[in-house]
Image: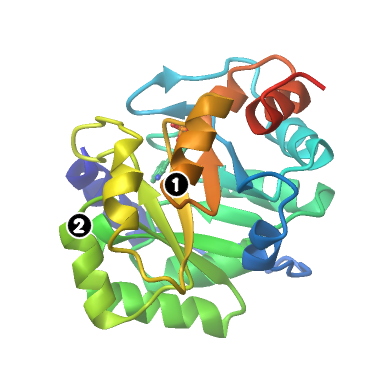
Amino acid sequence: MLETILAIKKQEIEQLYLPEEQPAEHVSFKNSLQNSPYSAGLIAEVKKASPSKGIIREDFNPVKIGHDYDKAGVQAISVLTDQHFFQGHRDFLTDIKKVVRVPVMRKDFIIDALQVIESSYIGADAILLIGEALEPKKLHELYLQAEELGLEVLVEVHSEETLEGVLKEFTPQILGINNRDLHTFETKLEQTERMAKLAPKESLLVSESGIFTYDDLQQVVSYGADAVLVGESLIKQDHIGQAVNTLMNGVRV
Ligand SMILES: O=P(O)(O)OC[C@@H](O)[C@@H](O)c1c[nH]c2ccccc12
């Protein structure tokens, strides 16, 4: 699956044009995650659909969801901007950034320098770079380019092998462990446990995907996660604010 996504992404990049640059005030992604009142920082995701689950939410209003997340007290918002597989859009990010206080991360399959510039232009505070999608050298190049543009980076890996390759090149400030294998879509929280053992102490550790309940959250925190990235379980709920509370506090407040 990942190969198919990347092949289509390459074609898209050939046609990519830059939008008008949005004036955006940057908010620190890492600081926000580190200063969570919960047992971990929460990155809440705005995602309509995914290749593994199909459409997750029919009545999808990205700005309303972003606004509700912000009001509910999340530490950061991740916005899926990939159109083809996730039914996202880069305008979703621009529109959400205008109405929230928390940092906004662009979630896409970024493999080219032009997309990093695009991320800055649309108003992102941070971007995702996927270890499984990039050679370590290229990943580091894009990471440095992003930093120069004032963007923070979440470096995501799934496998031990990928992480080892990245760490030979550099130490990311923020390291995400994707519990979902992007080739098979198999998702298990124990992936965080295995990978946390190899993660550098200096990196802020984010556990991503497949976190549905307060118990799931406690489980990944016990493995060493400093933050979590959660999409489906929040997006599916009618009341997003309540869903955030139930997930992070274990009770409805
Ligand atoms: O909806 P979930 O299982 O809570 O997962 C959110 C997020 O981790 C997932 O959307 C994701 C993690 N890494 C990605 C890379 C590309 C697209 C999507 C993703």
**94 shown above or below 55:** below
Q: Residue at x 54, y 24 (%)?
A: 213
**72 shown above or below 29:** above
Quarter that holds the C terminus: top right
**Residue 192 coordinates in the image, percent (x, y):** 35, 46
| Residue under label 2 | 160
At numbered mark 1, what does the secondary structure look like: helix, strand or loop?
strand
Task: Work out whether residue 214 can be spotted.
Answer: yes
**Residue 216 coordinates in the image, percent (x, y):** 48, 30
**Residue 3 coordinates in the image, percent (x, y):** 18, 46
Which mark, by number, is residue 193? none
* Disc 1 residue type (three-letter): Ser
Q: Are marks 2 and 1 in contact (CB under 8 Å)?
A: no
Which mark, by number, is residue 207? 1
Most extreme residue toward the front, as rendered? Answer: 222
At numbered mark 2, what does the secondary structure look like: helix, strand or loop?
helix
Pointer 2: residues within 10 angstroms few (<14), some, or many (20+)? some
Q: Nearer the viewer, residue 185 or 243?
A: 243
**Residue 71 coordinates in the image, percent (x, y):** 84, 38
Task: Give the image quadrant in which the ligand numbered 1 is located.
Answer: top left
